[in-house]
Amino acid sequence: MYDLGNVYDAEHQFLEAMRTMEKQSSSDNVKSLLQQHIRQTEQQIQNLEQVYQTMGQQPKRVKCEGADGLVSEAQKVMKETSGNPALMDAAMAGAWARVEHYEIASYRGLIDGARTMGNNQAVRLLEENLNQEEQTAQKVEQNVPQLLKQAMSAGQRGA
Ligand SMILES: [Fe+2]
């Protein structure tokens, strides 16, 4: 699977970014979603290590430029919205939703590759990860409108 090292690296990068976001977030909802997905991501990394095992290979991070770009973008919006907690939460959730969709696309590609190779064990492990990303994307997106509303009303109060 050509992109496995990229996804393995991306998950590590996103894990670190989520830990930072969790510290910065002032929304209980976003915080608890992040805590949940941090735990899932740790498990996903282990699943990827198992995928390597099914191929008799050692896990190896290959720098994922896409993840790097998404993380920089998230850092940028966090910096731009610092001092406005409600807006920062809305901006972080937006950046996070984009991360999840990137992961969904990546896992779909990996699953196609594993299927082509007839590696059913890898397909099962990768589908586990994909399902978590899909559910997370949905949960994060459900929170965005409310966060934006809160940011707007905080803005009107001059906060
Ligand atoms: Fe994820």
Image (tube, rainbow, N blue to C red):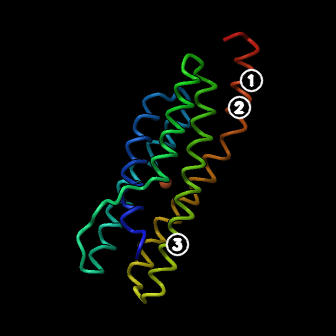
Q: Which numbered dot is residue 142?
A: none
SS category of the residue bearing label 3: helix
Can you tell me whether the CB of the residue at mark 3 lies under 8 Å from the nearest atom of ligand 1? no
Quarter assignment of residue 150: top right
- Reply above or below: 109 against 114: above
Disc 2 or 3, which lies upstream in sequence? 3
Q: Residue type at mark 3?
A: Gly
Outermost residue toward the bottom?
A: 118
According to the picture, the residue beneath numbered tag 3 turns out to be: 109
Residue 82 vertical position relative to residue 14 in the rendered view, above or below: above
Q: Please rate how many residues cluster around mark 2, counting C-alpha atoms within 10 Å: few if below 14, some from 14 to 19, many from 20.
A: some
Q: Position of residue 53 (x, y in %)?
A: 26, 75
Task: Tell me, for residue 152, which label it has, or none.
Answer: 1
Question: Helix or strand or loop: what does disc 2 sit on?
Answer: helix
**73, 95: nearer the viewer:** 73
Q: Mark 1: which amino acid?
A: Met
Residue at mark 2? 148
79 or 156, which is in the foreground? 79
Q: What residue lies at 73% left-to-right and 11% top-to-bottom?
A: 157
- Mark 1 C-beta closer than 8 Å to ligand 1: no
Q: Which mark is nearer the camera, 2 or 3?
A: 3
Vertical position of residue 6 compared to residue 149: above or below: below
Q: Residue at x 39, y 47 (%)?
A: 15
Quadrant of the snapshot with the N terminus: bottom left
Return the x and y of residue 132 as percentages of the image width and height: 51, 60
